[in-house]
Image (cartoon, grey):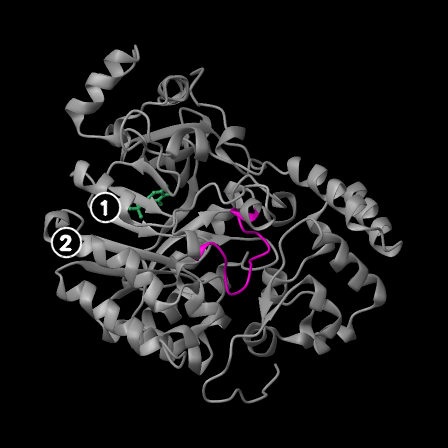
Amino acid sequence: MNKTRVSQSPRLEILLRKDLDSIPQLQKLSADARTDMRAVSAVLPFRVNRYVVDNLIDWDRVPDDPIYQLTFPQPGMLADADLARMRDLVVRNAPKAELEPAAREIQAGLNPHPAGQIELNVPYLDDETPLRGMQHKYRETVLFFPGSGQTCHTYCTYCFRWAQFVGIDELKFADNQASGLAEYLRRHKEVNSVLFTGGDPMVMKTSVLRRYLEPLLAPDLSHVNSIRIGTKAPAYWPYRFTTDSDADDLLRLFEEVRAAGRHLAVMAHYSHFRELETEAAQHAIRRIMSTGAVVRCQAPLIRHVNDSADTWKRLWRREVLLGAVPYYMFVERDTGPKGYFEVPLARALDIFSEAYRNVSGLARTVRGPSMSATPGKVLVDGIAEVHGEKVFVLKMLQGRDPLWVNQIFFAKFDPAATWIDQLEPAFGKTEFFFTKTVEEMKRTHVQPAWGTETHIRKRMTEFGFVEWE
Ligand SMILES: *Cc1c(COP(=O)(O)O)cnc(C)c1O
């Protein structure tokens, strides 16, 4: 690993596709490998910062190094034919007018909008006003996408929001003002948690983040008792919390949230224990926790990055050691370069279980492997044999219908399946318990989580919604 000392308060230096030739460490790669990189990064987002390049990647282990796989475009991320096509354009130095349409075509084939996020999750302030910068999928929690937080300090190669970073999405989920959010929350007392997400909300200056957070601290919004910030900054740019010019101001803002009687959780995305090994990363966690905020940790299980029980065991142990709380292990979503990164559910369960068995109860706050699928968060809880049939035991951790939460259900065992849509119900059933209702929700654009029960029952009757009991 490169042991170059970083200065006391380093400056965030972002490297993009156009900078690929000026990253000294990349000069070790073959010209062919660099061409691959230019080809892939014309289709999928690429952005890395100097801290990651100099401190997290072990360049002696490239291309197998996990953080290199996590942050740099890999040839296997595109299908062979697509890679060949893009390579050809790159080698001939094709003009943008030729490169971009080819890239768009390939992007369109990569399921840019998984899990019904637009058709089902965008809530309405009233019957006419969609709130584009929000998602309200589960009754208790609203997701908010601040308009100025829609990028990251570094992009993950497996990002499930990749579509917005290559401009197909025109930032469909983003809002520049918190006023719509506050008004929505005033009308929805069933919501008790707001999750700021992105992109990465921590790319925002503290003064901007403050404009979003402060309105939520109003006394008439006291039903919003927790505020969460989903971020990878503690891994990719820990100086955000330590030496950046507005880091102290950020900590004061966190303290204000706590002083207003709210729980504050930094939902930190850590993919690999190495991200927690630098002094800067550990300092960031200490500073966040000093404000009374809690650090909860989550990441997807990704082939080439963290697909071993040993990696997760060391990750969870270190999180606990530093005072953070392991929260979720996710299954890689059905979008983007999933063929390169996906891990079969059966193998994911093996990895999870072996790691879980080798940590103390303090780290067993983690749940997984969990799929954020259209009906809800589906946990692969185990494999069982019932009357001679081998099945996956699944559990709904979160559901579009609150009545589904904690429901156990069964699918035929399939060692190759990587996502819930590849699973079939067990015991001769023709559909899962939620299938009809989800179809009905898609048809009517109404779902239980969107309001108080009376409001929803009324709307469902208006829409002729039949499955609600
Ligand atoms: C995971 C998730 C939440 C939060 O769920 P918790 O179980 O409370 O952590 C909220 N909304 C969406 C869309 C989610 O995927």
Quadrant containing ligand 1 reads: top left
Residue interval drawn in magenta: 149-162
- In this rendering, the answer to whether 151 lies above or below 368 is below
Q: Considering the numbered disc 1 on the image, is that residue within a helix, a strand or a loop?
A: helix
- Residue 148 - label: none
Is the CB of the residue bearing disc 2 within 8 angstroms of ligand 1? no
Q: Quadrant of the C terminus?
A: top left
**Rendering coords of residue 85 (x, y %):** 82, 44
**Dominant SS type (magenta):** loop
Residue extending furthest left? Answer: 219
The residue carrying mark 1 is 182
Whether label 2 touches label 1, CB < 8 Å: yes
For this rendering, which residue is in front, 178 or 340? 178
Question: Which label was assigned to residue 218?
Answer: 2
Residue farthest to the right, as pictured:
92
Look at the picture and state if 21 lies above or below 406. Answer: below
Check the picture and name the quadrant holding the N terminus. bottom right
| Residue found 71% across the figure and 37% down from its top | 105
Q: Position of residue 384 (x, y in %)?
A: 41, 35
